Amino acid sequence: DPKAPDLPMGVLMTGGAKLRKAGLTGKGIKVGVIDTGIDRDHPGFNGKVALQKETWFRHGTPLEEDDHGTHVAGTIHMMAPDAEFMDYRVFGKYGSWSAVDAVATAIFQACFDGCHIINMSVGGRWPDEGIRNAVQYAASQNVIVVCSAGNNGDNDAKSIERNFPACWPEAINVAAVPKDFINVANFSNSNPEINYAGIGVDVKSFAPLCESGDGEGAKMRSKDGTSMACPHVTGLIAALMTNNMTEIEGDKQKVSYSDLIKDDASLRTLLNDRFAINQIVEGEDAATGFDPSTGFGFLTFLSKEELKELVIESSECSDYWKAFAASFDGDTEVLGRKGTNLLGMVNAPNEYNQISR
């Protein structure tokens, strides 16, 4: 069921429930999370986070303060619940490694540990040679590297804000969009190296158990950022890498997506052909469908109609927007016209131009 009630809306919109129904759960896939550390005792992870204290290159800050990594890993887990996590902590108050050296070393270590994909919801304005060498090594080993685009955007598609390692060609560079898809998130970087977009506004995921609170409030929290968009994409890719035959919609043919994913290039071909829904925004190249804010589009395992239905029924989008979406007749010929949003709707009135928070 694409609308499974126990999953956050961002995961549903990226196709998390539908992936599970198709048997694409990330089984047999190792995901390296290079971040602030993961609370492996959170019950939501179901024991999928490996005990790796030796790969915590920095430490000292409680996870309730450094909750970023737990939140990121939670989204990946909800997208690909059978994937195994390798936890590489590169931030914290103490440590003999600088954060930059820790990131570079963690990338190498993730490759040595057999990770198939690395999530890096981290980055900075200036490139670092050590991290660059590590990312290139990962690419040489056919390890997929997914990075957040950065949060220095100014809501202007014509301006350029770069973040590394996301902007290197070996990395999949992920921007953020809100759940109503009207615009790119106003904080999301724009540049010619953006590849795709994911849900990055009001994203609900795991919080470290040491946070104060009771019940679900102590287990989940919401965050904004391209850091939150990135793990939706990582989780989708991890699920697609599952070695399982899946029927192609509208066709009796079955395919194992894992057989199609040989390296970064073949993965991008698959994503572009099957799972990127184009969002027409300023600066788009009409020939390729690329734009500097969302790249080749929003990545999801859902069809456009399934995605539209979720938006209409979501309590997390405005009533105005839901009414406008419901009135859309589904005419696909509008695609490509200036002002068309991700669901194929043209020239939404200004009052819909808001980000749900």
Image (tube, rainbow, N blue to C red):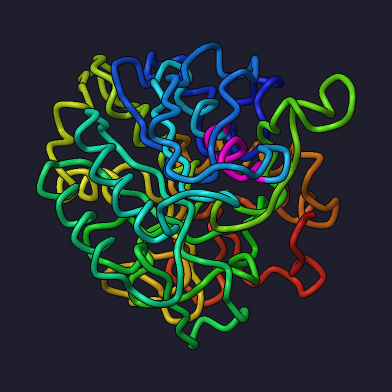
**Residue 216 pos. (x, y %):** 82, 23
- The boundaries of the magenta stretch are 66-74
Q: Is residue 64 above or below residue 162?
A: above
How far from the left and from the top, in percent, is residue 307?
57, 40
Query: Is 282 situated left or right of 31 in this image?
Result: right
Residue placed most toward the observer, 34 or 333: 34
Q: Which residue is drawn at 52% across and 50% down?
A: 91
Viewer-closest of 221 and 67: 67
* Left or right: 217, with 68 as reference point: right
Q: Where is residue 255 in the image (x, y as percent from the top left)?
A: 20, 22
Residue at the limit of the structure toward the bottom, as seen here: 159
Residue at the spot x=75%, y=72% of the render?
A: 349
The quarter of the rendered structure image containing the N terminus is: top right
Q: On the image, which quarter does residue 29 sit in? A: top left
Q: Is residue 84 left or right of residue 13?
A: left
In magenta segment, residue 337: no
Question: Residue at 66% across / 41% down in the picture?
Answer: 67
The kind of secondary structure the magenta stretch mainly shows is helix
Q: In which quarter of the image is the C terminus?
A: bottom right
Which residue is painted at 15% across and 33% down in the image? 260
Using residue 157 as the reference point, say whether residue 314 is left or right of it: right
In this picture, is 280 found above or below 285? above
* Residue 164: x %, y % from top left: 37, 68
